[in-house]
Amino acid sequence: MTKILKIIIISLLSLAVPAHAQRYTISPVNADAALKTENIRAHVEYLCSETLGGRATGTAGGRATAAWLESNFRVLGLQPLGGAWLHGFNTADGLARNVIGLIPGSASPARYVVLMAHYDNLGVLNGNFYPGADSNASGVAALLELAGMVTHMNTCHKIYNNGLIVVALDAKEKNQGGATELWRLISSGKLLDPVSGQAISPSQISLVVNLDQLGSTLAPLTEGHPRYLMMLSEEATGRRNTLISANQGRGFGLELGFDYYGSKDFTRLFYRRISDQRVFLEHGIPAVMFTSGITFLNNKPDDTPDTLDYDVLHDRIRLIFYWLDRVL
């Protein structure tokens, strides 16, 4: 048999293999096309606009923010849980709204990762407008971009085992009210998977990922090194090595911190007490928090969009996605 004839036969045999039977790896690099720095900035600037009035819980601006987030979830192709994206609950300041959507996974029985960021802020206090760019428009922008990257991978026929529950939380500034309500829905069996129609149970939650203040470079881990990211987690459940591997292997060069500036007390404070993942940790659900840390601008009228570093925020989101791609 001639060499040319062998090549022809091998080619014909390969054509006979059904496309669904061909095995190949879809790289997370494919999702880079869905991540644009200008879109990140546009999200932050809209969330910080005076039209939304600082996004305080129970205000017209808070309601408008929830409606805008619902619109974004629709555009991204997320599926509503229990037939609705908006899930209302009462607070002392009026009706609050969590916005919840799902990107289904393939595992049977189903497993889920929760990706969340709070969208509320202080609003207007004593006549002063609090735009809340870093806290937490930056986290909400990251939430939307990460969801978009995962859905983009779906269009590239990437199949994830875990479903991704995407949640924009309200009432964080009201004693983590949104996270508490999310846990109540899950623990009481009232959050329904739109694919199976079954209630999502706490035992099906593999991990909770919280995005809170991701856009600043004003409080670096090392003086003069603005390219950094903090991941707060339990060492055994946070998949830290996965983050380190993605950071090194893809050449991000971000300085990574796994505690809060070397302080056990501050790490405990931000990881276990005053951030939204607290509610899940208290019920034994593994959780991770990504942050760029508190700065002197947080919870002040000067926390404006022009104080953020969008190039670094872009790379933080991209690195978190590469980590999330492996976690899912």
Image: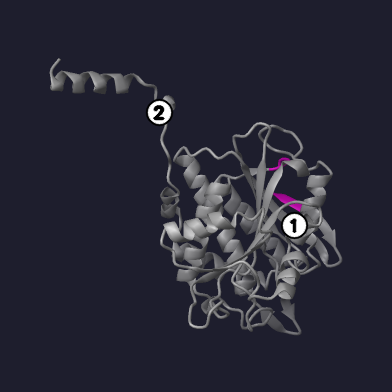
Q: Position of residue 230 (x, y in %)?
A: 59, 68
Mark 2 lies on a secondary structure that is loop
In the displayed structure, 281 sits above or below 291; it is: above
- Tell me which numbered mark, 1 or 2, is placed earlier along the sequence: 2
Q: Which amino acid does label 2 sit on?
A: Gln
Disc number for residue 298: none
Residue 153 percent location from the top left of the image: 48, 44
What mark, if any, has residue 97 been given in the picture?
1
Question: If the image is split into quadrants, where does the C terminus sit?
Answer: top right
Instruction: Please rate how many residues cluster around mark 2, counting C-alpha atoms within 10 Å: few if below 14, some from 14 to 19, many from 20.
Output: few
Secondary structure beneath dot 1 equals strand
- Is 161 left or right of 98, judged from the image as shown? left
Q: In this view, does 5 lie to the left or right of 200?
A: left
Q: Is the magenta stretch mostly helix, strand or loop?
A: loop
Residue found at the very far right of the displayed protein: 92
Q: Is residue 278 above or below residue 124?
A: above
Where residue 86 sits: x, y (%)?
Answer: 71, 51
Indicate the quadrant where residue 6 lies.
top left
The residue stretch that appears in magenta? 81-88
User: Mark 1 is on which residue type?
Assistant: Arg
Q: How many labels does the image show?
A: 2
Q: Quadrant of the N terminus?
A: top left
- Could you say which disc has been placed on residue 22 in the image? 2
Comparing 281 with 20, the one in front is 281
Q: Who's the residue at 77% across and 57% down the image?
A: 281
Q: Can residue 34 be seen in this view?
A: yes
Q: Residue at x 69, y 69 (%)?
A: 55
Task: Give the residue displayed 82% in from the left and 46% down from the top.
Answer: 187
Residue projecting furthest to the top? 1
> Which tag is nearer the camera, tag 1 or tag 2?
2
In space, the residues marked 1 and 2 are separated at their CA atoms by: 44 Å
Does the magenta run of residues contain 52? no
